[in-house]
Image (cartoon, grey):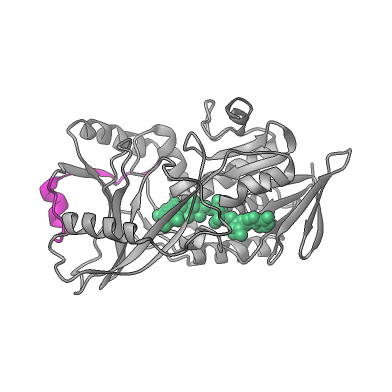
Amino acid sequence: MPNQRVVIIGAGAAGLASAWHLLDADSTLSVTVLETNSPGSGSTSRSIGVVETQYIGDFDIAVRAYGRRFFDMLSEKHDLRFVRTGYVRLASKESDFADYKLSIARQNAHGVHDACVLTAEEVEALIPQISMAGRLGGLYGPSDGYVDGHLYSALLTQLVTEMGGTVVLNAKVTEASQNSDGVFSLATSRGNFEADIVVNAAGGWAGKVGDLLGAPVPLIPQRHSAAIVEVGADLANMVPMVMDYVPGSGRPGLYFRFERPDQLAAGLHIEEPVDEPADPDSYIETGSDEFVLELAEQLSERLPHLANAGIGRSWSGIYPMTPDHAPIVGLHPDNPAVICALGGGGNGIQLSPAMGRAVAETVVNGVVTRLGEHNPWDAARLGTSQ
Ligand SMILES: Cc1cc2nc3c(=O)[nH]c(=O)nc-3n(C[C@H](O)[C@H](O)[C@H](O)COP(=O)(O)OP(=O)(O)OC[C@H]3O[C@@H](n4cnc5c(N)ncnc54)[C@H](O)[C@@H]3O)c2cc1C
């Protein structure tokens, strides 16, 4: 429907990518983003910003390959800083290599042609500081890299505004009501906004916003931390990002990436929600002592040659997670005027372009086709999971 009023709650990666894709798909839409604070002020600006395609499942690769193309476009056309450090996912068992071969074939099919398998010796040649003890090699994406979540949000805000959308800052949605035609009225600190469609892109707050909208979602906010590692010397070259998390292990695994010649950014990643839900309005915004100790231990095992390294500033943010670890994107089964764009977990930057594209397909075509017939992100599963 032309001139449909779409109001997106949340100017993080998910909300802003949704706004961009909506306006790109149909410039007659009226698109407004309402944001409590400033663009990216939630999880997005606290992320490590890694964008990569080194997954095994075809769907996981397809959505990330689309994300890569979107970040390539932003970098080429709009000067977004996309730092191509490369990315290595370490192998801990022989059977990983069969998966990696499958991954390379699938990445090829989705237009990513440079991924390859490395032996342990080849990883050591790329990253002279690393110890490969207990690791057999890796899956390497040479053109993977990272973006700065704050700059990504600022650029999308600028582009959305240039495309005719509106991003209203300091506008926290505090109340929502719906008239008999289904039109929403959203009360904010910057006045009331009417919407034919509301997109819940509120990240760690999506559970609270879902309740306000009468469209509940099972969002589990998980606090995760990261830290700057002062290397204590200059790294000779831009080492690739390393992911040493063993999927399904139930144990947070180390990751680190190049930040500057004398700094790495590092953290501990896990795909499952393992802690008590955090309150996104009130959580400790630095890494705990336990986090710093565990990080230091894993770093000294994996990077034993950085003898003078020390952990500097640490910070925390929220992984917006769902019970089955997959984002929820599409029409809410209880209310056809609410679209979900939430649950990016620890991957919400790299997944945001595909999430935004699915939101636009939902509004413009009424159906999401590009995520395939068995779309694991489909919000219809809320009907059975709650
Ligand atoms: C330490 C750390 C490292 C990470 N590293 C990576 C990485 O390397 N790669 C990657 O892809 N992902 C990473 N992530 C995950 C990524 O940051 C998140 O998945 C992503 O930012 C979520 O984006 P979002 O838009 O869903 O949520 P957010 O960025 O939190 O945006 C939601 C927005 O909604 C606003 N909002 C909430 N309630 C309301 C309301 N009532 N009214 C108006 N506005 C409201 C909030 O203010 C917020 O700005 C990392 C996360 C952390 C914490």
Which image quadrant is residue 116 in? top left
Q: Hey, which quadrant is residue 62 in on the image?
A: top left
Residue at 16 percent of width and 66 percent of height: 306
Q: Quadrant of residue 163?
A: bottom right
172 above or below 261? above
* Region in magenta: 111-133
Name the residue at 17% across, 44% down: 137
The reply, left or right, for residue 235 in relation to residue 339 is left
Q: Nearer the viewer, residue 26 or 245?
A: 245
Q: Residue at x 69, y 43 (%)?
A: 211
The quadrant in which the C terminus is found is top right
Q: Quadrant of the N terminus?
A: top right
Which residue is at the front of the view, 25 or 315?
315
Question: In the rendered image, is residue 43 in sight?
Answer: yes
Q: Which residue is at 74% across, 35% downward? A: 336
**On the picture, is 130 further left or further right than 115?**
left
Residue 195 image position (x, y, % from top left)? 79, 49
Total numbered labels placed on residues in the image: 0
| Residue 71 in view of the camera | no
| Residue 116 on the magenta segment | yes
Q: Is residue 329 above or below residue 208?
A: above
Q: Is 123 a magenta residue?
A: yes
Coordinates of residue 332 in the picture (x, y in percent): 67, 35
Q: In the picture shown, does residue 89 fall above or below 237?
A: above
In the image, 23 versus 261, the foreground residue is 261
Most distant residue in the right direction: 180
The percent coordinates of residue 368 (x first, y second) are 61, 34
